[in-house]
C-alpha cells in the first residue's frame, strides 16, 4: 500500500499508529462491518459504499454507489450503482477470493426482489446471483444471508429497502424461510437452514417456550468462520400482533429476543451457541475468533456491566475474557493470541462523551489498554439508524485496520497501520 504518499494523515489527538483517510475528497462513504475486510485479497484495493445523501434513510429504489479505491495510486473509481442498501452496511460489499471478485446486493425494482452481483471491478464484467449476500466465504465460493427484506423488522440498516406491503410476515419459525447459501460459480441459491429446523434440531436447543408459535421470527446476521467451514447465524423474534411489526429496536426493544446458532455448510453439527437466556442479560456483536472454533462478543454476563466474553461454537465454555474490563463496540481477537481490538459507541461508558470514541487495544493476558485512535463518529441527524459505527475491520494480513468516522461534515473511511503495536 502507498498510503503515506497518496492519502492525508489523520493526526488529531496524536494517534499511536499511522492513520490515513482513504476517502478525502467527496466523502459520504462507509465500509461494511467489523467482520469483513473492505481491502482486497492482494491489498491493492479498498471497496466502500457511497451514500446518495446522508440526512435521511433511503426509500425503496434510491440508488447508491459502489466505489473502489486504488491504494497504490489513490484513484477512486465508481464501479456500479445499486438499490440494494441500507445505512449501516451499505450494499453488504464483500471481496471474494481474488481482486477480480466483488459481491454486493441490488434490488429489481420491477419485482422488488433482491439479489447479489458478482462483479469484476477491473473490467466491469458481472454475473447475477439468484441469492443475496450478507457474508462471503474467504475463498469467494459461497454467499450466505438471511432474508434481506425482513431485517428491518427488528433493526433497519442492515438489509435492503423494499415497500413494506410486499414483505413477508413469519408467524412462528417458518419452514420456507431462514438462511440461504449461494454458489458463486453457478449463481444458484438454496435454503440451507430453515427457521423451523433451527429451533427443532439444534443441540443444545434454543431455550424457548410455546410463545415462539405466536412470535414473528426472522434471520439476521450470518457469518463464515475464517476457515470457511462453519457458519454462525443470528435469529431474532418478538411477539406477533394483528399487523406486521417493524423497527422493533425503536418500538419495543425489550420484546426482541435473540439466539446465535452455528453449523457446518453441509447442515451438520447444528448448535445453539448463545441462547436467549444469555442474550436477555444484554449484549451485542458476536463474531468468530481467528481459530474458527470460538466466538467473541459483548455480554452482561454477571448482570453488572457489559463484558467481553468468549464461547465455543457448540455453546460450551462461556466465560469472561477479562474479569474487570468494560466491554464495548465491535470486538475482534487478533491471531497473535495477545490482543483484542474494539471500538465504542458514543453512548457507551468507554467513549469520551463528546462525540469522539477510542479504538481500544487490549492485552489479553493483563487487560492493559491503549487508545490507538480518538476520532469523531457523531453526526448531525438524530436518527439512530444513521449513526456512524467505526466497525474496525482487519485486512487479510492482520496488519491494517479499516474504520468509519465523521470528519469534515461527512462520512469517511480510514485505514490504520497497526505494525507498530502488534509486534
Image: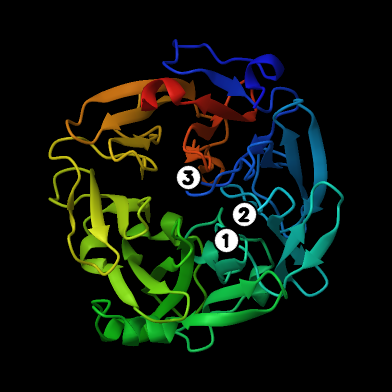
Quadrant of residue 214 in the image? bottom left
Q: CA distance from mark 3 to mark 2?
A: 12 Å
| Residue 347 at x, y percent in the picture | 36, 34
Q: Is 289 placed left or right of 306 in the picture? A: right
According to the picture, the residue beneath numbered tag 1 turns out to be: 134
| Image point (53%, 34%), residue name | 403
**Quadrant where the C terminus is found in the figure:** top left
Work out whether mark 2 precedes mark 1 in sequence or the reverse, and give the earlier one. 2
| Residue 335 at x, y percent in the picture | 36, 43
Q: Does 44 sit above or below residue 7?
A: below
| Image point (79%, 48%), residue name | 121
Asked whether the beta carbons under mark 2 and mark 1 sit within 8 Å of each other, the answer is yes
Quadrant of residue 204 in the image? bottom left
Q: Is 22 placed left or right of 398 in the picture? A: right
Work out whether mark 3 precedes mark 2 in sequence or the reverse, and give the earlier one. 3
Q: Secondary structure at mark 1?
A: loop
Crowdedness of circle 2 by 10 Å Cα count: few (<14), some, many (20+)?
many
Q: Is 334 placed left or right of 185 in the picture? A: left
- Of residue 165 and residue 90, the one placed in the foreground of this image is 90
Crowdedness of circle 3 by 10 Å Cα count: few (<14), some, many (20+)?
many
| Image point (36%, 86%), residue name | 213
Crowdedness of circle 1 by 10 Å Cα count: few (<14), some, many (20+)?
many
Q: CA distance from mark 1 to mark 3?
A: 13 Å
| Residue 92 at x, y percent in the picture | 62, 54
Callout count? 3
Asked whether the beta carbons under mark 1 and mark 3 sit within 8 Å of each other, the answer is no
According to the picture, the residue beneath numbered tag 2 turns out to be: 92
| Residue 269 in sight | yes
| Residue 350 in sight | no
According to the picture, the residue beneath numbered tag 3 turns out to be: 34
Asked whether the beta carbons under mark 3 and mark 2 sit within 8 Å of each other, the answer is no
Q: CA distance from mark 2 to mark 1?
A: 6 Å
Amino acid at each position: 500500500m502507498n498510503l503515506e504518499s497518496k492519502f492525508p494523515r489523520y493526526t488529531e489527538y496524536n494517534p499511536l499508529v499511522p492513520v490515513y483517510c482513504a476517502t478525502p475528497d467527496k466523502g459520504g462513504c462507509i465500509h461494511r462491518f467489523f467482520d469483513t475486510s473492505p481491502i482486497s485479497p492482494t491489498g491493492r484495493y479498498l471497496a466502500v459504499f457511497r451514500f446518495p445523501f446522508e440526512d435521511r434513510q433511503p426509500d425503496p429504489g434510491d440508488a447508491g454507489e459502489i466505489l473502489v479505491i486504488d491504494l497504490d495510486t489513490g484513484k477512486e473509481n465508481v464501479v456500479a450503482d445499486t438499490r440494494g442498501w441500507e445505512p449501516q452496511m451499505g450494499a453488504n460489499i464483500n471481496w471474494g477470493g481474488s481482486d477480480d471478485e466483488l459481491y454486493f446486493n441490488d434490488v429489481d425494482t420491477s419485482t422488488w426482489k433482491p439479489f447479489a452481483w458478482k462483479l469484476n471491478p477491473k473490467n466491469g464484467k458481472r454475473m447475477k446471483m439468484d441469492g443475496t449476500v450478507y457474508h462471503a466465504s474467504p475463498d469467494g465460493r459461497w454467499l450466505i444471508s438471511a432474508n434481506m427484506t425482513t431485517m428491518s423488522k427488528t433493526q433497519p440498516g442492515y438489509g435492503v429497502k423494499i415497500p413494506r406491503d410486499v414483505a413477508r410476515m413469519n408467524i412462528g419459525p417458518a419452514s420456507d424461510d431462514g438462511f440461504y447459501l449461494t454458489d458463486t460459480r453457478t449463481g444458484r441459491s438454496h435454503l440451507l437452514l430453515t427457521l423451523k429446523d433451527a429451533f427443532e434440531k439444534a443441540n443444545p436447543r434454543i431455550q424457548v417456550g410455546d410463545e415462539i408459535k405466536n412470535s414473528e421470527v426472522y434471520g439476521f446476521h450470518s457469518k463464515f468462520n475464517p476457515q470457511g467451514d462453519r457458519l454462525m447465524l443470528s435469529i431474532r423474534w418478538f411477539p406477533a400482533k394483528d399487523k406486521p411489526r417493524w423497527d422493533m429496536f425503536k418500538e419495543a426493544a425489550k420484546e426482541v429476543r435473540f439466539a446465535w446458532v452455528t453449523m457446518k455448510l453441509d447442515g451438520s453439527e447444528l448448535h445453539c451457541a448463545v441462547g436467549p437466556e444469555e442474550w436477555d442479560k444484554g449484549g451485542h456483536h458476536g463474531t468468530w475468533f481467528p481459530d474458527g472454533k470460538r466466538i467473541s462478543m459483548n455480554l452482561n454476563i454477571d448482570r453488572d456491566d457489559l463484558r467481553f466474553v468468549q464461547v465455543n461454537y457448540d455453546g460450551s465454555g462461556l466465560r469472561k475474557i477479562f474479569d474487570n474490563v468494560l466491554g464495548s463496540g465491535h470486538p475482534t481477537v487478533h491471531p497473535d493470541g495477545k490482543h483484542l481490538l474494539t471500538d465504542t459507541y458514543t453512548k457507551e461508558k468507554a467513549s469520551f462523551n463528546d462525540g469522539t470514541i477510542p479504538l481500544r487495544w487490549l492485552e489479553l493476558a493483563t487487560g492493559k489498554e491503549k487508545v490507538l485512535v480518538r476520532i469523531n463518529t457523531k453526526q448531525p441527524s438524530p436518527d439512530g439508524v444513521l449513526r456512524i459505527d467505526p466497525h474496525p475491520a482487519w485486512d487479510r494480513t492482520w496488519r491494517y485496520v479499516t474504520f468509519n468516522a465523521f470528519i469534515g461534515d461527512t462520512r469517511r473511511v480510514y485505514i490504520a497501520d497497526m505494525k507498530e503495536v502488534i509486534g
